[in-house]
Image: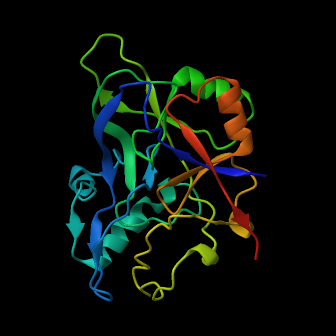
Amino acid sequence: MRFYLLDDVPNRRYSGSYTYGHKWGLPGVHCPACNATWATTGDAYPSVDLSHLPAQEQKKYLPRVEADYAEFERLREQVRPLVPPGVHLWPGSAFGPMHGSAQGEFGPLVLVNPWELLMRREPLECLQAEGLRGLKGCRTALRFRKKNPPELLEMELLPRGELHPDCLPERPPPCPKCERDGLKLPDKPLLDAATLPQDLDLFRVSGTMIIGTERFVEAVKRLGFEQDIAFRELPVRGT
């Protein structure tokens, strides 16, 4: 099986763009062990609804930094039953629908930022009909200023797979408390074959890398949905 990184194209056909923030999210955190204040980018679970929480609790999931690490852990465990099983909830993980303003024209698949993929409903349904696995679209709350705006769905992509150690620089071990490792993505990513999922055709690696299988890429191209999306094959290495 071949695997491909979804990437932007130099000259986009469609002009669509947006500014956004998800409705809720885990706060950034200050770690008392390593003294880092940090949050991730790319970990988003738009299907997670926190509206059942009291208003005061919901405010704790607005963009901010939590200085009390024990309180951060409490907030994380409070939402853990709502997210997909096995997900590692990092500081900055986003929940709920994507909000913000949108303008311009959008193609079938939308990759304005490399860590998030949007689709229009009809292309998504066509790809699902092809039997592709891992395609879960969640409605956005993006605001358009024009009549009859397109329905854009944010893909909820599960974190699966890892980079192979051979492509990573030597670095200190992760913090034993917050697990931050400060890893920067390598220029030439190499996927670890033993960690790649066998049941998904679209997923995330290292937070910000969206990976599609050759089944996904072939279906997108066959259906003519590849405008404004580039597919870069990544090498895979075993142990």
The image quadrant that residue 61 belongs to is bottom left
| Depth order, front residue of 136/10 | 10
- Total labels: the figure holds 0
Question: Is residue 201 shown to the viewer in this render?
Answer: yes
Residue drawn 30% across the image and 10% down it = 147
Residue 136, compared with residue 239, is above or below; it is above
Q: On the picture, is 133 further left or further right than 57? A: right
Q: Residue 137: x and y, percent?
A: 53, 35
Residue drawn 47% across the image and 66% down it = 185
| Depth order, front residue of 95/206 | 206
| Depth order, front residue of 144/83 | 144
Q: On the picture, is 25 further left or further right than 155? A: left
Q: On the picture, is 6 further left or further right than 215? A: left
Residue extending furthest front? 10
Residue drawn 28% across the image and 72% down it = 29
Residue drawn 40% across the image and 63% down it = 78
The image quadrant that residue 25 belongs to is bottom left
Q: Residue 239: x and y, percent?
A: 76, 77
Q: Residue 104: x and y, percent?
A: 32, 22
Residue 12, compared with residue 111, is above or below; it is above
Q: Residue 5: x and y, percent?
A: 58, 50
The image quadrant that residue 59 belongs to is bottom left
Question: Is residue 132 shown to the viewer in this render?
Answer: no
Residue 172, compared with residue 17, is above or below; it is below
Residue extending furthest top? 147
